[in-house]
Image (tube, helix red, strand yellow):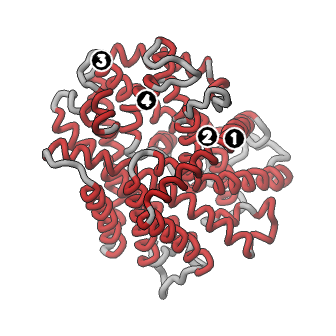
């Protein structure tokens, strides 16, 4: 990959609107933090509350599409006539790690406590009913409903790449099946702009959650207090790393770091599973899986309209929105690595590899944290109240044998995960906002760097307001247009592929 001959020009109608909008939002929040905080709360309440049912319906309908891809007339269709690019084992390994960032270390360690002390379905805090859902609801939040959002649209992109032979890097192109030639005009520009805003909001949420983990580990090891300045320095370092990788030709180094963080994550899980309460981890995992499977429909349509506790809005609907923000870009990635696979093979592999990866984190780190709480190894409640959930997670990890080594390893894992995430998203945004990229041609370096700076700036601005709500709002607000775009893409696919691709089954 190279920038080709001459400078790659930007598409000004796509490049500037999201750039200006995000910059104005950051400036407004910094200048008027109280008004900005109030606006964010209203937006979050509207999207997750008033429109919560729409997210749940979309996610459930997406599961229906996945089942159709497994058992319907497309199941034996192949994504291209070529042989698979990767061996099945390598391919599954790549799928296993797709869509999971370093923030899962935090969620898998702390979710149980939030569910236990503010449980769903009107249960009393710390009651047997609350314990019942403390891990089971994590399996729902990170299960087939969430990861399935990457898969259905991934099939569609695979169809575009390997059957229609179209190199789709703008989502507007994939909307042509329903919207026709209009996607090549102003309507297509609007679709691509909303897609960019959604993905910026999603990655800003990931950075905003990853930064405190690193800050808290740094303060734990150094004894220095955590401040906004520490968080700002961490985000600045990420941006500098991206700049060096872009201008210094270190892309291969970034790719190697990405592979390294995968192995590092598995090593951490393996060691915690061996050193921790292994029997309890296995027993509680199977118990939670039973609850998850038994109550799946109840969890899927839970809006809490009567009690109004805010549980579904703060948790499953937020996670659906967060996954949605990355759905198009992750779907493209999944399709890119799945050439030659059947639709059934792709759907099963991509769905359950991602789910298994997430479940392993919760089975190991989640149960380790539960054991630490039950046996009073860490006063999680006091720490959360005084210093927040991120500090509590670090204190839990500090109870591990060789805790300093583990903390450094986790710090490295989250740091690399977030750096590679910023790099890939900045590259994606630069591709979408470039004008007439040739095959194999990279977007301009300054274009990629611009998006890295914007992403870092928005992340820091949201953290400036404090608390989790600003980060949740970014993901939920940004995901709304993405959900609409996905619906257009999926409907268009069935409208066109149903006629041209699905009439006859492949002969095996």
Q: Residues within 10 Å of mark 2 (few under 14, many from 20)?
A: many
Work out whether mark 2 precedes mark 3 in sequence or the reverse, and give the earlier one: 2
Q: Which residue is mark 4?
A: 114
**154 vs 250: above or below:** above
Front residue (pair 413, 395) = 395
Q: Is residue 320 visible?
A: yes
Q: Quick one: label 3 or label 1, which is nearer the N terminus?
A: 1
In the rendered image of this protein, does residue 282 appear above or below residue 369?
Answer: above
Circle 1 residue: 62
Which mark identifies residue 148? 2
**Residue tagged 3:** 277
Q: Quadrant of residue 244?
A: bottom left
How far apart marks 1 and 4 lie (CA) works out to: 28 Å
Could you say which is closer to the camera, residue 104 or residue 165? 104
Which one is closest to the eye, mark 1 or mark 4?
A: 4
Residue 89 versus residue 305: which sits nearer the camera? 305
Measured Cα–Cα span from mark 4 to mark 2: 25 Å
> Is disc 4 placed on a helix, strand or loop?
helix
Mark 1 element type = helix
Q: CA distance from mark 3 to mark 4?
A: 22 Å
Q: CA distance from mark 3 to mark 1?
A: 37 Å
Among numbered discs 3 and 4, the one appearing first in the sequence:
4
Residue at (36, 66) in percent of width and height: 251
Q: Residue at x 44, y 23 (%)?
A: 116
- Distance Cα–Cα, label 1 vs label 2: 7 Å
Mark 3 element type: loop
Within 10 Å of disc 1 (Cα), the crowding (few <14, some 14-19, many 20+) is many
- Separation of marks 2 and 3 at Cα, in angstroms: 31 Å
């Amino acid at each position: 990959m190279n920038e080709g001959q001459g400078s790659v020009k930007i598409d000004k109608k796509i490049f500037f609107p999201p750039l200006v909008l995000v910059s104005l939002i950051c400036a407004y929040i910094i200048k008027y933090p109280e008004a900005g905080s109030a606006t964010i709360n209203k937006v979050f309440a509207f999207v997750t509350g008033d429109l919560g049912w729409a997210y749940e319906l979309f996610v459930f309908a997406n599961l229906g599409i996945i089942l159709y891809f497994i058992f319907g007339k497309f199941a034996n269709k192949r994504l291209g006539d070529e042989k698979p690019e990767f061996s099945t084992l390598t391919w599954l390994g790549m799928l296993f790690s797709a869509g999971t960032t370093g923030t899962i270390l935090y969620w898998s360690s702390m979710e149980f406590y939030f569910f236990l002390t503010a449980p769903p379905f009107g249960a009393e805090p710390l009651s047997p009913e609350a314990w019942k859902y403390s891990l089971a609801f994590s399996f729902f939040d990170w299960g087939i409903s969430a990861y399935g959002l990457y898969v259905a649209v991934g099939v569609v992109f695979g169809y575009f790449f390997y059957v229609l032979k179209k190199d789709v890097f703008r989502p507007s192109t994939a909307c042509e099946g329903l919207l026709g030639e209009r996607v090549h005009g102003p309507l297509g520009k609007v679709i691509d702009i909303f897609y960019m805003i959604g993905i910026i909001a999603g990655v800003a949420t990931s950075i905003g959650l990853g930064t405190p983990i690193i800050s808290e580990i740094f303060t734990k090891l150094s004894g220095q207090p955590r401040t906004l300045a520490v968080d700002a320095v961490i985000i600045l370092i990420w941006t500098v790393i991206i700049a060096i990788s872009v201008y210094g030709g270190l892309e291969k180094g970034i790719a190697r770091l990405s592979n390294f963080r995968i192995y590092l994550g598995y090593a951490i899980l393996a060691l915690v599973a061996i050193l921790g309460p292994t029997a309890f981890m296995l027993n509680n995992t199977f118990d939670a899986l039973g609850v998850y499977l038994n109550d799946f429909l109840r969890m899927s349509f839970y809006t809490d309209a009567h009690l109004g506790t805010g549980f579904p809005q703060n948790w499953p609907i937020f996670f659906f929105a967060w996954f949605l923000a990355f759905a198009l870009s992750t779907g493209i990635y999944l399709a890119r690595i799945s050439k030659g696979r059947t639709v059934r093979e792709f759907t099963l592999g991509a769905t359950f590899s991602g789910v298994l990866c997430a479940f392993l984190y919760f089975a190991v780190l989640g149960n380790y944290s539960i054991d630490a709480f039950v046996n009073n190894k860490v006063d999680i409640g006091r720490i959360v109240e005084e210093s927040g959930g991120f500090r509590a997670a670090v204190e839990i990890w500090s109870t591990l044998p060789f805790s300093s080594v583990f903390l450094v390893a986790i710090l490295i894992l989250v740091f690399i995960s977030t750096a590679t995430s910023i790099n890939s998203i900045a590259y994606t945004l630069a591709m979408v906002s470039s004008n007439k990229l040739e095959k194999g041609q990279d977007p301009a370096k300054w274009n990629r760097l611009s998006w890295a700076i914007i992403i870092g700036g928005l992340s820091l601005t949201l953290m400036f307001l404090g608390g989790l709500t600003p980060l949740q709002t970014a993901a939920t607000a940004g995901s709304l247009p993405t959900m609409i775009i996905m619906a257009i893409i999926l409907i268009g696919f069935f409208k066109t592929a149903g006629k041209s691709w699905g009439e006859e089954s492949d002969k095996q």
